[in-house]
Amino acid sequence: MTPGTLDLPPVPDPSVAGRAAVDARRARAAVKRALSAGQRGPRDVAERAWQEPGSPEARLRVSEFLGARRGMGPKRVESLMRELGIAPAKRLGGLGGLQRERVRGWLDSVDPSRRPRLIVLAGPTAVGKGTVAQYVREHFPQIRQSVSATTRAARPGEIDGVHYAFVSDADFDRLVDEGEFLEWATVHNKSRYGTPRSSVQAALDEGSSVLLEIDLQGARQVRESFPDAVLLFLAPPSWEELVRRLVGRGTETEEERERRLASARVELASQSEFDATIVNADVAEAAREVVEHILAAEADAGAPPAAERSARV
């Protein structure tokens, strides 16, 4: 720096900021056009806005989002926003938890084609099914998750009734005899897991989609008894990464790890039985893909009516 002069920061180029603002407006306009044309569903746009705060969806004003739906003129939008308790200048990504639930409720009421669906998330050991399911549970509360019963002991950090219902062998036998399970299986030739039938049916009857985090055997049983269920396979980025995750978990003996890895080789070969494969390289991204599949399934006009679902469950 020359003596007597100030070392001032560079002056921002206004043309760069101007171009960024234009690009942002164009991106928001593209979202609105897709909404108006029916190329994107409002639930998809809303959930993306709440999951990705920096996205064009999040920067949409709520009035623009609501007004993009056919038949929603300015007066109806203004009235609805008062009813939902949302300020005129509020952006979609800036809504609080209660406001989001109100918007979800409104979307349910105006979208009669939406139907709750049963979604299965399966995959090999240590692929991260529980972690991805927990992310969905924490960030997408509108999607219900069935809590499986298991005879294995709880791992560190697992909570009874939240991650699993930990039961004795005798209690599991009783539930099997009473026909309480939608599916159940012995996993890795050791512990048993089962999905309670009653809780799944209750959530579907209430209009909520249900995510099941189960193993390959259970997924096959669900497909047999519930043909319109959507089966998602969670895969690791590579076999080496799967082994690293299992060893790093440190919750199994060496003998059990070998048994689980042998099962994983068989499970990885079953991907063709599933409707879609999601690679779990990043938990948040994998969870977002799971939710996108759920929203797409809910909007599928070809899904059978609730009465038919109830008869099968």
Image (tube, rainbow, N blue to C red):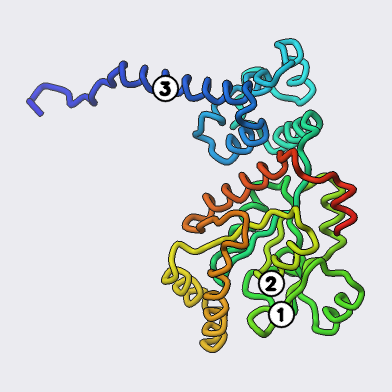
Q: Do the residues labelled 2 and 3 touch (CB within 8 Å)?
A: no
Front position among marks 1 and 2: 2
| Residue 105 place in picture, x, y as percent | 78, 34
Q: In this view, does 127 lie to the left or right of 138?
A: left
Whole-angstrom CA distance, mark 2 to mark 3, is: 49 Å
Badge 3 marks a residue whose secondary structure is helix
Q: Nearer the viewer, residue 244 or 289?
A: 289
Which residue is disc 3 drawn over?
23
Whole-angstrom CA distance, mark 1 to mark 3, is: 54 Å
Q: Quadrant location of residue 80? A: top right
Whole-angstrom CA distance, mark 1 to mark 2, is: 8 Å
Badge 1 marks a residue whose secondary structure is strand
Position of residue 202 relative to residue 170, above or below, is: above
Q: Are marks 1 and 2 in contact (CB under 8 Å)?
A: yes
User: Seen from this angle, which residue lies furthest right?
Assistant: 178
Q: Which of 56 and 226 is in front in this view?
A: 226
Residue kind at label 2, given as amino acid type: Gln
- Give the crowd class for mark 3: few <14, some 14-19, many >=20 residues within 10 Å: few
- Observer able to see residue 130: no
Q: In which quarter of the image is the N terminus?
A: top left
| Residue 140 place in picture, x, y as percent | 67, 46
Q: Is residue 138 left or right of residue 254?
A: right
Give the residue at x 77% y 44%: 303
Q: Quadrant location of residue 38? A: top right
Residue kind at label 1, given as amino acid type: Thr
Give the residue at x 51% y 74%: 246
